[in-house]
Amino acid sequence: SSGTSAAWVSRPPPLLGSSCVPPPYLSATMAVSTGDHAGYLHLTGDEPMLRVQKQKAVHSARWALGCFASVAAAFTVGRQTAPSVNIGAPVQMPADAPWSPWVPQLFQPVLQPAYTNEPLAKSAVRRFDMYLMTQAAFATPAVKTLNVEQWLAPDFLYETVGFATSRTPRGWCESGEEDQFRRTFNESVFSQMLFLGTDDMASTTSYGSVFWGNDLLGVLAPNDWVYFRVADFYAARKISPVAAQLYYNFMIIDFADLFRRVGRPVLPPAPLPEGLVLTAAANDGVPAPLSVVAKAQDAATALKVAKAALQEDWIGSGAGAGTKQWRSHWHSNLTFYGPGGIGRAHGTEQYRQYVLEPFRAAFDDRSLDTKIFGCEGNYCGAFGELSGRHVGTWLGLEASGKILSIRFALNWRVVDGLVQEGWALFDIPAVFKQLDLDFFAMAAAARPHIHS
């Protein structure tokens, strides 16, 4: 990232009686913004504020020639008489100093009218994402921190897969994770497929089309364009009747599918088709759902159905038991988008045979810890941990007898009281780590070969 630094500046002495001295009513500060006013010089004083675009701020040749000699002389005198200043550290000014310190303008996104009355957590994520996508790459960590503090709470906690955990907005800005991500994927376009939220939670699912140009977590860069899926879950608290701040964010990338795509698979081939993940098969907006559309849907029924899907599918007793229960909340024409290693299931039979039964057979004594759960209209999302005793093979990992925890990110679309579509990601690298295996080192060591 790039940006500018600023220091206090003392008022210069009159320029030897030159007409170049600014009028006494006017004070000036340079403000560099990463917002819509980037590259503007802001002049403030008793006169109305002027906005002059830097590129067009061309002084007349007559004024410049008249001032040149005076400026040169003043510069010479200033060098001989000015106190020593440590460039890069603020210069302390007297309390009555007439000039103000440099303060960056905070980014304020301009939203479409349809977005103005979104649930508070969703609105905070939207503004936060707009800043990250359009401004953050050009800001210093200090300027970035000032901006993201609008939407991130002082106790903000960021957890992810593969990268370091960070705390506080400043810690997130300075952790280097985002910088490493940008260096690795030097060009990128992200397209959101799902974006739902309430006043206290939000969830997004996106796919990135990125140019992977630098090594990632020890895996050599293919120097080519690649695709991957990413999901985020957020927890928020209300800070005013019209605003919320995010105090938690979990981000997960489908690393299993990403490494398969670049010819470094860690998991065995899935029994179902891998790779293709789509947004909702409905005219609910992209990303779905558009809040003004979701308001007309039955969120209470969707919440009940999604909770049953989570509990009965993943915690239900035994590999063959509970079939009647899970079928009671899934549409016969369901589509389930699983992660790399599991794949995409169509219909209840594929979902039972290739998604649920292998998981239930591999883990006994299953339990559930739900950390974030919410629905906007008929779209629901859940983040948490599944735990169980590892007694069978799952994703190529043979039984270990250990109690394993698996972080999950799940979403559902409910239609007429049944789940029509589901999306899932699991923290597979963490499962490997609990078995003393390094998922990323295995990807780095894999012999590259082409996968579609």
Image (cartoon, rainbow, N blue to C red):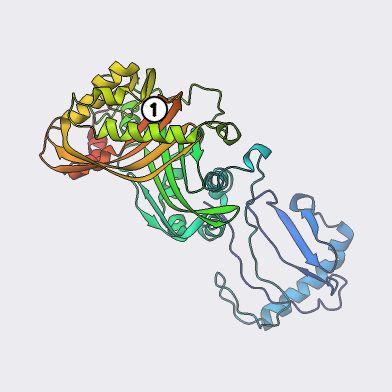
- Image spot of residue 310 (x, y percent): 32, 34
Q: Secondary structure at mark 1?
A: strand
- Image spot of residue 17 (x, y percent): 86, 78
Please give left or right for residue 122 compared with residue 78 in the image.
left
| Mark 1 Cα-neighbour bin, 10 Å: few <14, some 14–19, many ≥20 | many
Residue drawn at the location 80% of the way across and 61% of the way down:
49
- Image spot of residue 201 (x, y percent): 46, 46
- Image spot of residue 125 (x, y percent): 52, 46
Please give left or right for residue 309 compared with residue 104 in the image.
left
- The relative height of residue 265 versus residue 429 in the rendered view (above or below) is above
Residue nearest the viewer, comparing 265 with 395: 395
Residue nearest the viewer, comparing 224 with 191: 191
Residue drawn at the location 57% of the way across and 71% of the way down:
87
Residue drawn at the location 81% of the way across and 54% of the way down:
58
- Image mark count: 1
Please give left or right for residue 39 compared with residue 277 in the image.
right
Residue nearest the viewer, comparing 369 with 229: 369
Residue drawn at the location 69% of the way across and 77% of the way down:
10
Tell me the quarter of the image containing the C terminus: top left
Please give left or right for residue 297 compared with residue 344 in the image.
right
Q: Which residue is mark 1?
A: 422
- The relative height of residue 226 versus residue 106 in the rendered view (above or below) is above
Task: Write down the quadrant of residue 213 in the picture.
Answer: top left
Task: Write down the quadrant of residue 426 in the picture.
Answer: top left
Residue 171 in view here: yes
Residue nearest the viewer, comparing 290 with 159: 290
The type of residue carrying mark 1 is Gly
- The relative height of residue 174 versus residue 118 in the rendered view (above or below) is below
- The relative height of residue 274 versus residue 79 in the rendered view (above or below) is above
Residue 215 in view here: no
